[in-house]
C-alpha cells in the first residue's frame, strides 16, 4: 500500500503554530567596561552598554547615576539626565553608547569620577557584577608642581660595592676627619669602607665581615670611631653595638636591646643611641620588647663599658593599651591566645635629636607613632600618634591601582596610616620641628598577616558605610589596594566601617614639643613624580632589578618616602626626602614649616633597564667645611642597586634665566568642606605684601572679595548657601590657580 504523503501535514502545521506562539527571549545586557577614563577637555565621556546574548524581544533599560559615590558633580563637571532609557530592538546585536557632555573648567583639581548603573530592565536581563561603570575625568589644568630651583643637586657619581642582589648599600655614614664612608652592607653581611677623597670617583678601602658579630643593620661614625648596630644571629635575642677603628679593626662591643635597627650619635657626641625594633619570630612564639639603648659616650670609646648602656623599654605603658589605642597608637600584635603587651608591640625604627642633645625622638613605625626620650633621665616623656591621611580631602589624592592604565590621582573614602620610617629635626626661629618620611609598613608573619587586598572577599565592607562596595572593589578603582585588616571594624561585627591603607605617600612636619602636625605634603610627591618629564615614565615603579614597571606600586604604598635629612645653607633650612621605590630625592625649603616650598627633584635611575641607583635608603648631608672639595654634598645609599650616589649641592642667588617663570604654587584651603558659618582658612605659599581674593559661585557670580597682607586669610562663609564655590587670588601681582571649596 502506498503511504499517505499528507498524513504528517496537520502535525507539521501544529509545530509551526507552536513555534510562532513561543514567547520571545530576553536579551542579556551589561556594561561593556567597568571603568572609563577620559580627559576633561574631551568634550564627552562615552559609556557603552553591550548585548552579551541577543534575544528575540525588544528591550529597554535605564542608566542612572549611582548615588552617594563620586567626586565629580552633575551639572558642574558633567551633564547627565537621570534616568536615561536605552531601547534595544528585537533581535539586535548592536551595543549602544551613552555620550555624557563634560565641562572643561579652569580649575586645578585631581581626577574626578562618577558612576552609572543599569537598572529596571524590560525584555532583558542584566549580567550580575556588570551593571556599574566608573567614569574618571582626568583634569587638564593641573601642571607639574613648581620647582623653585634656588638649590641644585648635580650627580657626581655612583659607586657599586658589589653585585646587586648579593650585596647592598643600606645605610651610609661619613667621617670628615678621614673622608671615608662607612656603608652597612646587610645583604653581603659586611661593613664596607670607602674613600670619598674624590666624590666623583669613590674607591674601596676595606670590607669587614660582620659574621663574627651578627647581622649589620646600621652604622654611625664620629672622630674615626665606627659604631655598628648589629642584630643577634638569633634575632629575638639582645643585639650589640660593635665598635671599629677607622680602618675596620675591632675595638670592643656592648649589648643592647633586641634587633637594633638604627644607630646615631647625638649632635654633641655625648650619647650614642640605638632604636631596637624587637620584632617577633614568624609564629609569635618569641616576641621581645622594643626598646631604645642609650650609651654614655662622654668619655669617648675608652670610657665605654657595658655599664655605660641603659636600655629603656616601654613596660611602663603596659597598663595603658586602651588609652593609647584611643589616642591613635596602633597596638595589635601577638596571637589571639597570647596578645602582645604594649612593650612587646612597640617597635622603634629611627632616631633623631634636638640641637641641644637633650632629647631623642624615635619613630615607632608599625605603631604609627613617635616617642620622646629625655636623654639625661633616660625616661620617655611622650608617646604620640602621627595620625593618618584623609584621602577623601582636597590635596590628599592618591593613585590606588596598579591595573588602571592611566595615572588617576583621585580622592577616595580611605585613610592612609602614615607609619613613618626615618625622621630628622630642624630649628626655625627657636622652635624644633620634626620631619618624617611616611613610608608605611605592614606586619607580615605566619601568625599575623595584616595586609589584604581591598577587593578580597576576606575584606568585607560594611554595607551602610559603603553602599557601593562593588564599585570600590573594582581592580581599576580600589580593589588592588593593600589595606590593613587590623583596623577599621569600629563596631566589631566582622565587616569594615573604615578603610586604612599603608603609608602616607608623603612627608609630615611636626611640632616637636606638642607632636602636632603643622604640615603634610599630601599628594605632592605623587603629583611631582607622575608629571616629571623623564621619570613620569616609571611613576610608582618598584625598585626591583630589571626593567621598571610603571605603577606597579600604586596598589601598595606608592613612592614610599624612606629617608630624610636636613641642612642649613645660608639663611635657609632645606629638607631632602628620598623615595624608596621609584628612586630619587626631592628637596624642600622648610623655612616656613607650615608651608614648605618644593625646590628640586632629581633621580639617577634608568627608565628602561635595571641600571642606575635603585632603592635609596640612607641619606647623609655633608656640609661644605666637612666636604673633601669644599662643596656641600648629599650622599644616598641605594639598597637594591648596592650603590652609593654622591650629589654636589649648588646654591643659586636667583633663578637662572634658562628656567622659565613658574606658575604660582597652589593655595591651601582648610577645612574643605567647610561647615556653614565657619571661616575657610587660606594659606599662601609665602607672605604677600598685597593680596586680594574673590569668591564666586558656580555661575561665575562674585559673592565675596577682600584685600589683605601676609600669608594667611580667613574667608567668612556666613550667608553662603551650601554648595560649591571657587576662590581666586592675586598676590603681589601673581595669580594663583583657582581652587574649589565646598560649604556644607
Image (cartoon, rainbow, N blue to C red):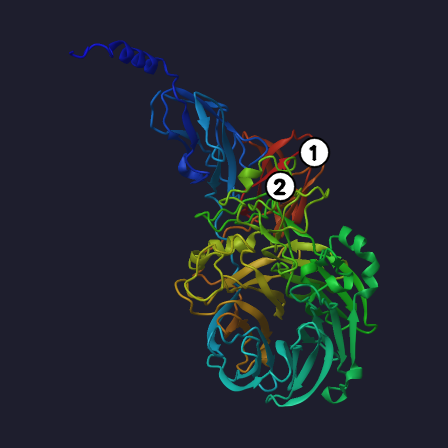
Numbered circle sitting on residue 698: none
User: In the depicted view, which residue is nearer to us: 235 or 602?
Assistant: 235
Which residue corresponds to mark 1? 676
Question: Residue 348, relative to residue 83: is it above or below?
Answer: below
* Image quadrant in which you'd find residue 241: bottom right
Mark 1 closeness class: few <14, some 14–19, many ≥20 residues within 10 Å: some
Q: Which residue: 62% across, 90% down?
A: 249
Comes first in the chain, label 2 or label 1: 2
For the N terminus, the quadrant is top left
Residue 356 visible within the image: no
211 horizontally vs 376: left or right: left
Question: Residue 109, relative to residue 93: is it above or below?
Answer: below
Q: Residue furthest front?
A: 1
Task: Give residue 733's position: percent from left, percent from top.
Answer: 55, 47
Task: Give residue 543's position: percent from left, percent from top.
Answer: 49, 64
Q: Secondary structure at mark 1?
A: loop
Q: Mark 2 to mark 1: distance in Å?
A: 31 Å
Q: Secondary structure at mark 2?
A: loop
Q: Which residue: 84% across, 58% down?
A: 319
Q: Residue furthest left?
A: 2
Look at discs 2 and 1 and give the one toward the viewer. Answer: 2
Which residue corresponds to mark 2? 461
Mark 2 closeness class: few <14, some 14–19, many ≥20 residues within 10 Å: many
Task: Give residue 321's position: percent from left, percent from top.
Answer: 79, 56
Task: Give residue 363's position: percent from left, percent from top.
Answer: 69, 64
User: In the depicted view, which residue is nearer to us: 274 or 534?
Assistant: 274
Amino acid at each position: 500500500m502506498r503511504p499517505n504523503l499528507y498524513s504528517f501535514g496537520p502535525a507539521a502545521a501544529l509545530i509551526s503554530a507552536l513555534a510562532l506562539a513561543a514567547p520571545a527571549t530576553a536579551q542579556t545586557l551589561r556594561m561593556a567596561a567597568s571603568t572609563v577614563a577620559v580627559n576633561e577637555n574631551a568634550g564627552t565621556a562615552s559609556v557603552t552598554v553591550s548585548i552579551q546574548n541577543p534575544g528575540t524581544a525588544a528591550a529597554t533599560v535605564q542608566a542612572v547615576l549611582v548615588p552617594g559615590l563620586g567626586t565629580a558633580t552633575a551639572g558642574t563637571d558633567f551633564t547627565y539626565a537621570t534616568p536615561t532609557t536605552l531601547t534595544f530592538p528585537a533581535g539586535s546585536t548592536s551595543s549602544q553608547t551613552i555620550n555624557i557632555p563634560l565641562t572643561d573648567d579652569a580649575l586645578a583639581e585631581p581626577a574626578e569620577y562618577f558612576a552609572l548603573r543599569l537598572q529596571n530592565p524590560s525584555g532583558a536581563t542584566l549580567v550580575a557584577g556588570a551593571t556599574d561603570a566608573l567614569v574618571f575625568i582626568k583634569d587638564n589644568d593641573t601642571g607639574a608642581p613648581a620647582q623653585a630651583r634656588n638649590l641644585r643637586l648635580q650627580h657626581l657619581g655612583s659607586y657599586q660595592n658589589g653585585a646587586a642582589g648579593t650585596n647592598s648599600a643600606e645605610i651610609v655614614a661619613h667621617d670628615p676627619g678621614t673622608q671615608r664612608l662607612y656603608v652597612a652592607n646587610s645583604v653581603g653581611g659586611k661593613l664596607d669602607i670607602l674613600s670619598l677623597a674624590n666624590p666623583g670617583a669613590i674607591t674601596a678601602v676595606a670590607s669587614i665581615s660582620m659574621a663574627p658579630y651578627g647581622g649589620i643593620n646600621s652604622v654611625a661614625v664620629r672622630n674615626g670611631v665606627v659604631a655598628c648596630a648589629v642584630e643577634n644571629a638569633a634575632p629575638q635575642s639582645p643585639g650589640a653595638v660593635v665598635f671599629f677603628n677607622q680602618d675596620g679593626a675591632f675595638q670592643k662591643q656592648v649589648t643592647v636591646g633586641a634587633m637594633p635597627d638604627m644607630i646615631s650619635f647625638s649632635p654633641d657626641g655625648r650619647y650614642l643611641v640605638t632604636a631596637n625594633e624587637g620584632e617577633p619570630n614568624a609564629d609569635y612564639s618569641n616576641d621581645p620588647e622594643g626598646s631604645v639603648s642609650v650609651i654614655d659616650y662622654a668619655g669617648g670609646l675608652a670610657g665605654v663599658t657595658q655599664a655605660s648602656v641603659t636600655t629603656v623599654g616601654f613596660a611602663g605603658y603596659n597598663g595603658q593599651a586602651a588609652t593609647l589605642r584611643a589616642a591613635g597608637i596602633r597596638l595589635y600584635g601577638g596571637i589571639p591566645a597570647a596578645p602582645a603587651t604594649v612593650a612587646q608591640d612597640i617597635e622603634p625604627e629611627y632616631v633623631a635629636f634636638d640641637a641641644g642633645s637633650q632629647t631623642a625622638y624615635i619613630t615607632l613605625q608599625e605603631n604609627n607613632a613617635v616617642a620622646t626620650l629625655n636623654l639625661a633621665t633616660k625616661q620617655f616623656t611622650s608617646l604620640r600618634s602621627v595620625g593618618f591621611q584623609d584621602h577623601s580631602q582636597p590635596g590628599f589624592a592618591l593613585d590606588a591601582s596598579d591595573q588602571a592604565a592611566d595615572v588617576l590621582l583621585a580622592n577616595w573614602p580611605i585613610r592612609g596610616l602614615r607609619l613613618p620610617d626615618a625622621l630628622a629635626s630642624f630649628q626655625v626661629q627657636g622652635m624644633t620641628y620634626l620631619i618624617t618620611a611616611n613610608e608605611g609598613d605592614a606586619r607580615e608573619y605566619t601568625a599575623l598577616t595584616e595586609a589584604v587586598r581591598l577587593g578580597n572577599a576576606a575584606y568585607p565592607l560594611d554595607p551602610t558605610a559603603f553602599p557601593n562596595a562593588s564599585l570600590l572593589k573594582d581592580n581599576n578603582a580600589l580593589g588592588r589596594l593593600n589595606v590593613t585588616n587590623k583596623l577599621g571594624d569600629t563596631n566589631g561585627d566582622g565587616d569594615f566601617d573604615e578603610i586604612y591603607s599603608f603609608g602616607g605617600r608623603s612627608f609630615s612636619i611636626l611640632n616637636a614639643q606638642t607632636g602636632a602636625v603643622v604640615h603634610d605634603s599630601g599628594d605632592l610627591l605623587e603629583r611631582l613624580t607622575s608629571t616629571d618629564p623623564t621619570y613620569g615614565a616609571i611613576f610608582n615603579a618598584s625598585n626591583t632589578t630589571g626593567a621598571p614597571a610603571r605603577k606597579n606600586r600604586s596598589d601598595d604604598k606608592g613612592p614610599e618616602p624612606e629617608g630624610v635629612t636636613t641642612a642649613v645653607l645660608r639663611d635657609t633650612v632645606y629638607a631632602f626626602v628620598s623615595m624608596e621605590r621609584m628612586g630619587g630625592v626631592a628637596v624642600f625649603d622648610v623655612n616656613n614649616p607650615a608651608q614648605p616650598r618644593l625646590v628640586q627633584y632629581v633621580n639617577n635611575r634608568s627608565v628602561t633597564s635595571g641600571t642606575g641607583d635603585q632603592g635609596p635608603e640612607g641619606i647623609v648631608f655633608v656640609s661644605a667645611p666637612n666636604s673633601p672639595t669644599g662643596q656641600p654634598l648629599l650622599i644616598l645609599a641605594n639598597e637594591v642597586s648596592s650603590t652609593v650616589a654622591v650629589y654636589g649641592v649648588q646654591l643659586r642667588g636667583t633663578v637662572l634665566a634658562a628656567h622659565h617663570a613658574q606658575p604660582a604654587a597652589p593655595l591651601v584651603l582648610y577645612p574643605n568642606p567647610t561647615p556653614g558659618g565657619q571661616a575657610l582658612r587660606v594659606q599662601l605659599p609665602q607672605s604677600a605684601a598685597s593680596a586680594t581674593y574673590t569668591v564666586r559661585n558656580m555661575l561665575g557670580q562674585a559673592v565675596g572679595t577682600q584685600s589683605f597682607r601676609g600669608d594667611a586669610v580667613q574667608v567668612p562663609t556666613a550667608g553662603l548657601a551650601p554648595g560649591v564655590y571657587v576662590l581666586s587670588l592675586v598676590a603681589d601681582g601673581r595669580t594663583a590657580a583657582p581652587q574649589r571649596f565646598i560649604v556644607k
